[in-house]
Amino acid sequence: MKKNVGNADRYLRIFLGIIIAILGIVFQSWWGLLAILPIGTAFMRFCPAYMPFGISTMKSKEEKAS
């Protein structure tokens, strides 16, 4: 599994995941469980939706360090 989520993308996913989770708690909705997706892909640094399109937000230095 090749990493395809860069640092900026990763931080944005974590931020959005936290916001979604908080909104799910505040509104007492199961939709808050959707926060698992962006947070999970941020920590795995892999997004399956990027694969068919050949998208990678990794910079070349990040790819070499990993």
Image (cartoon, helix red, strand yellow):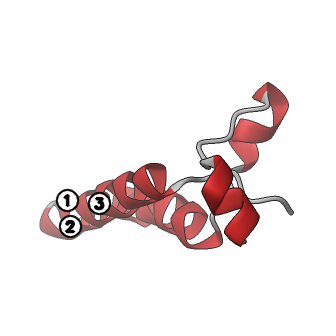
Q: Is residue 15 left or right of residue 53?
A: left
Q: Is residue 1 above or below residue 59?
A: below
- The three-letter amino acid code for the residue at tag 1 is Leu
- Nearer-the-camera pick, 6 or 51: 6
Query: Disc 1, disc 2: CB below 8 Å?
Result: yes
Tell me: 21 left or right of 10: left
Give the mark nearest the N terminus, 3 or 1.
3
Q: How many other residues sit within 10 Å of disc 1, few (<14), some (14-19) or many (≥20)?
A: some
Q: Is residue 36 left or right of residue 62?
A: left
Looking at the rendered structure, the secondary structure element under dot 2 is: helix
Residue at 38% across / 56% down in the picture? 31
Residue 13 point in image, percent of width and height: 42, 55
In terms of depth relative to the viewer, which is nearer, 61 or 47? 61
Give the residue at mark 1.
23
Q: Quadrant of residue 11?
A: bottom left
Q: Please name the residue that numbered disc 3 is placed on.
A: 15
Q: Amino acid at mark 2?
A: Ile
Give the Cα separation between the discs numbered 1 and 2: 4 Å
Q: Residue at x 62, y 49 (%)?
A: 58
Task: Identify which residue, 33 or 36, lies in the foreground.
Answer: 36
Question: Residue placed at 67% from the left, 49% from the top?
Answer: 60
Mark 3 Cα shell of 10 Å, populated few (<14), some (14-19), many (≥20):
some
Please give the label number shown on residue 22: 2
Residue 52 position in % (x across, y down): 83, 31
Q: CA separation, marks 3 and 1?
A: 12 Å
| Residue that lies at the very extreme toward the left in this rendered image | 26
Of marks 3 and 2, which one's residue comes earlier in the chain? 3
- Regarding mark 1 in the picture, which secondary structure is present there? helix
